[in-house]
Image (spheres, helix red, strand yellow):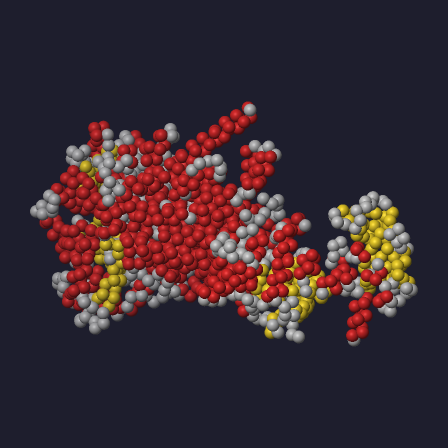
Amino acid sequence: MKKEKLFSLFYILPIVIMILFLFVFPLLYSVYISFTNLSLLHFLTYSYVGLRNYLIIFQYGYFLELLKNTLIWTIGSLLTMMTLGFVLALILNQTDLKGRSIFYAILILPWAFPGFISILIWQGLWVDPYGMMNRLVLPLLHLPRVNSLTSTTDAWIELIATNDWLSFPYFMTVFYSALQSIPRELYDIADLDGANAFTKFFTITLPSLKRTIAFVFITSFVFTWNNFYPIYVLTGGGPGISTETFIVYAYQEAFSYNNFALAAAWSIISTIFVIVLGIIVIKYTRILDSFT
Amino acid sequence: MGSKVKKIDYKAISKTLVAVIIVVVIVIAIGGIYAYLSSQHSSTPMPTTSSTSTSVTSTTTTSSVLNTSNPQALMQLVGLSTAPSTPVTITVWNSYSTSENQAFNETLAQFEQAFPWIHVQVTYGVGVGTSQFETAAKAGQAPIVYRDTSDSGGALFAAGLVLNLSQYLPQSVTSLYVPTAIKDWELNSSLYGLPDNVNYIVMFYNKKFVPYPPNTTEQLVQIAESVNKTYHVWGIAYGAGDEYGYRFAAWFAGFEGQIFATNNGKVVPSLNSTAMVNALNFWYNLTYNLKVNYLAPSTGAGGAEGQLFVANQTAIIFDGPWDLNAYLQALGPNLGAAPLPLVSQTGLRAAPFIGSTGFLIASPQASGATQLQIKAALIFVLYFTNYQADLRLWEVAHDIPANLQAYNEALSQLKEGMLKPTYLNQIMEGILEQAQYGQQFPNIPQMAYYWNSFHQYASEFFANKINSTQAVQGMEQAFIQALVQNGLMSALIPLPILPPFQYVLALISVILTPMVVVISPKKRW
Amino acid sequence: MMDYVKLEDIWKEYEEKKRKVQVLRGLNLEIEKGEFVVILGPTGEGKTTILKIIAGLLRQDKGHVYLRGELVDDLPPKDRRVAMVPQNYAIYPFMSVYDNIAFPLRVMHSSKEEIRKRVLEVAKMLRIDNLLERKPSQLSGGQMQRVAIARALVKEADIILMDEPLSNLDAQVRVVAREELKQLQRDLNPTIIYVTHDQVEALSLATKVAILHNGVVQAYGDPMEIYKRPNSAWVGSFLGNPPMNIIRGEIEGDSIIIDNYRVALPEEYKNLVKSGQKVLVGVRPEDIEIRDDGEIEGMVEMVEDLGPYSIIHLKINEETTIRVIEKSLSRRERGEKVRISIDTSKVVLFDASSERNLLEQYEKVKKK
Amino acid sequence: MMQIKKYRLFKILRLVISYAVLIIMAAFSIFPLYYVFVTSFSNAPNLISLAVSDLLPKHIYFTAYEYLFTTNLYGGSFPLWIRNSLILAGSTAIISVLLALITGYALSRLNVPAKKILATFIYIVTFFPYTASAVPLYLLFAKFHLLNYIGLILAYTPGTSIFAAFIAKLSIDSIPASYEEIAMIDGLSRFGAFLRIVMRLALPVVALTALLGFSGTYLDFALAYSFLLPNVKEWTATIGLYYMAGLLNQASAPAYNIFAAGAVIMGIPLMALFIVSQRMMTRAYSNLAGVKQ
């Protein structure tokens, strides 16, 4: 028995070691740094300052503002892209629809295209009034133009729409996969019972996808919370700090202000938030139960 | 059965939770203790290696004329009588652009011929002002030589990552460079780098739309309006909303403002002034009321400003000579360059930062360099900022020389109209003229905290979120806060190491409240 | 004669959802070479666990496994030279039939020609040589089963473990497969350890049956012998369909008193019991006849019509119901009163407390 | 009769709406890519197209592609960097697959002590943002002299593997244990059975992990840049492309047509890979739905 346990540890060892080095070490290091004054003037020799950095955050920082932004960014992105992915998956899952695979192939292209390039391209597309979004697409749809420099709302629209473009194929794929694994018989029985499309959706489709939605939600929640590039490239957190999230702010704190200690403290606080929120979701969805 | 299983599951999850909480607590505790312990060690002041450098300078012959092109003279200057028997390798991070690299490579070939015992390992294409250098320095892997801008070099020097050249070179080397340029590299009367060129922004205009370069802001507005009316293109493309304050500093100065003031011998920000209000309002007016300025989302030749300028969609932009080639290619003889205009309200010139790029040498803690490597690096930086090297940069890439001799040579070339194509002479003259109306680029560490403070409130102002008074108050406050947070200004309320009781309580409750929610048994999702 | 497969005091415990389940509790089993042993037991009693322990896939917590007379506790599965046919056949879906059968040989690095020769030989024997190029998804259940057996045979291991290999087959195919399996064993004479919960399979296939219950072998021996003379009341009631009637009774002189009725005490038990002793009377439903002059009267409670015969449940008193097989097609009604007679020569008696066969107890004493 | 008519009408309506949504979304997904494509064949280094008519180019220039394939920058070249990227991404993919599947296997099959706590822990530490771990990682890897491909592969692998390990676990759950048991009896070791049988049966997950591992590495810029900066010959295609297009060096004006051309060269194989493996991908992800309630 003991030998068996040791033996199975051997299998889990590689990932544990990697995680210790690649996640736990940086985490510990950041916690450590956040208690010091490592910054431009104390770069090679720094000292312990206790909770000073955390106090700065709560006393001087834009804590609530950033929290609000981070939530708008995360929830706004997630809701829209999950809905989009879900609707597309439902559409693609109709058996009497022709050309499904072609559409699917086209629709996953944004995912397959180098993201760092896409974001730059989108930056160009959103330029007001020259980018194609403002010059062609939005006027075509009779929508007002979007200028992220002059309006916070516009900045959020720009960010979330771009993020949607980048990520909806992933959600579409996951939901499409899940939909395909629902046994046809369930629908056949429902048909015999005379259920309409809505009843079928709410009694069969949605419950069958509950787990998938939960798993995808928590994974993507963390990813989006920590996602940095779209904001950094598209709006740089502006106007002002109105689209700045914890992570973007921490990054700027580290690399523009060279205040690595404060940046570490911001990162730790941000991480505590995701961990707490993550645990709540994990707890309510019991998603990790299936993985152990 | 079902309920039983549920119960077991619930228990398991909360056990996990407890484990996670314990892990988090342990992690934080270990981190804290470790930080505390190691700070006890590291807080003992380290003997700075530079002070033990056995005063190399004493052996230097303070010869009347320094000739940094002569290998022998260079070696003597750093205290070497003969070439060492074993070769020395120095690592160099090069931040030149592609065209500048042509000049660099030529100089490098000559250098390697002159100093066969120095092997130069070049990393091309490094950015300036990069955090890469800091991270590498933290790991003790910084390059021995780095080419950076004077202001971010100043920050590196303040951080102790860069060698104090004053301890290695005689004061007389400063005479080799254009005074404004070498001044950019002095902090607390220490020299921390040697400049290879001078840079600042100028006004580029398109002769197709602009009949004469505006000399005052009144003229600027006039021209912009008439261009707008006649040609239906933008008069100016200046993304004041996407500004970090590098270019805006010129207007700020023109409206009689100063970034820093001295108060009881201490440097304090002085952004909260009518000058800033006026400068902001001036550009707001051009953008929103007269609608002749395009509030571009990105700057430079690759940004929206440059692209509009290149596409004949705007008459005037403000940019530096580093983008000259792109504009020259696109506009040819239509391209004009002139100094920024006089601010009519004050009668003062809009004065851009006269910055400089140059070579600096990493401190031994940052790069792990030996004394011999440092000597080789000194030779390198002197050689690459000498007359020939700098003139080459001017000829190939039109960099404004920082080497005095090369600068004078460039001026005489312009006077004789020797540049080809001929219209380039006029452009370069315009660019060089700007140097007379510049302001010194502050390189004190405080400067590092100016950019974001300015940006945050300027962009909110141009997004119509706040008025100009709020903006200037905000940026000043943010600036002060940043300085306080980084220990560059004393705080109004001193920050204790151990937080007040209520903060600890608040922090704990912030962390624990959601956890309590988690632990409380609830219906399954 | 050396035991070819020997399990000695095997203990095994599982942990399931934080609860410890003891599956095997000191199991002993000795199997001779060339035997076809069927391990029979209810589901969830650890039959498959035994096979896995023999194969080396699981390690017993305590006890020893001997194969061919050698202790193999520390030998990994690949070195134990056994073959196995798992319940779901585990035919690799990504390989053709040929590759599936050839797999064990490939792993042993046999030569190409050797593999080809052996696979064809085995395939021909199992009449699947026409299926070799197919993919498993194109096979029927019976064909899959043959492929699985072919794969087990191909490596010429002389110990073959089978885990309910017939349970996934249709009833008709199953009968044929059973016959074929039996024939195969006779022809090639490997030692087969076969696990099932199906009594018919056990009785028809086995040269020896081991009945597993509560983590130990309850009975081990010739299947018909166990059927006729089960060594415990549990074995008696487990084996046979309908199961053996176990009725409470008391010895009184030369007869057994059941309820108010008197039944003659069988000859062989005469010296083993004394008056007043409480016993359990085991009698198979087919050994009871419905006769008007029968000793015992009961009321028909339920009739199971199975076609060739019916099972009649007779209520004797509040706590005793007796099952009787009646071959005639005559219909009985619920509530009808009938009389039955027990063939006393076939009756077995168990100790009322230990539930062991009294005969066995006596033999044990004699041995000592 | 009416019923059937109504049903027909409903069906037609449903299909029409579906097609409309699909066509709009397809246009939405393709438009930026088309834009990149067009830009790569122009000779204007602009990102902001100044006229709608530019969307249908009158002239096609191959200058950007020519530049990418012929220019030698600092002693490196784009084809060399592409090769480097492929090697790096390929190795990461292989190691990610091994790591993910081994972990998934252990979680699914083996009696790992404190499995639940371990899994939760593994899951939760990944919440720490990448941007914050970049500097500590650099310092750590510098200390171990791992600022090279080996270090990069080590740093890339867990990101993909942890997510993939959970999917692999679900996938392996659905594979009957008898497959590997029979292989072990037939002469493979446990690890051998894992390699030859389990990995093969979990092929969709293997493919998905490989794909995610590959694309993650292939497209990364930040980490590769900080690790490989001093060695031009070891640069990856992403770093190379940034330099070729002049996006990193503020002293040169960006050439977006070159950037777009590089994007096309890098993007087409990746898109092909995604399209080819889409079936595997859907099958791998469908494991998520198969989770027991």
Query: How many numbered discs sit on the rendered protein?
Result: 0
Percent across and percent down for residue C251 are 89, 63
Q: Residue furthest top?
A: D2
Depth check, front residue: B17 or C36: C36
Which quarter of the figure is the N terminus of chain A placed in? bottom right
Left or right of A33, for residue B123: left
Name the residue rendered at 37%, 36% in the picture: D27
Depth check, front residue: B118 or C353: C353
Specify the quadrant of the image occupied by residue A239.
top left
Which quarter of the figure is the C terminus of chain A placed in? bottom right
Depth check, front residue: C81 or A254: C81
C151 w.r.t. D216: above or below: below
Left or right of B128, for residue A177: right
Percent across and percent down for residue C134 are 49, 53
Percent across and percent down for residue D11 are 50, 30
**Is residue A210 visible to us here?**
yes
**Is residue B466 visible to us here?**
no
Specify the quadrant of the image occupied by residue A188.
top right
Name the residue rendered at 34%, 59% in the picture: B136
Percent across and percent down for residue B278 are 29, 36
Left or right of C109, for residue B211: left
Name the residue rendered at 68%, 59% in the picture: C204
Depth check, front residue: B398 or A39: B398
Name the residue rendered at 29%, 61% in the picture: B143
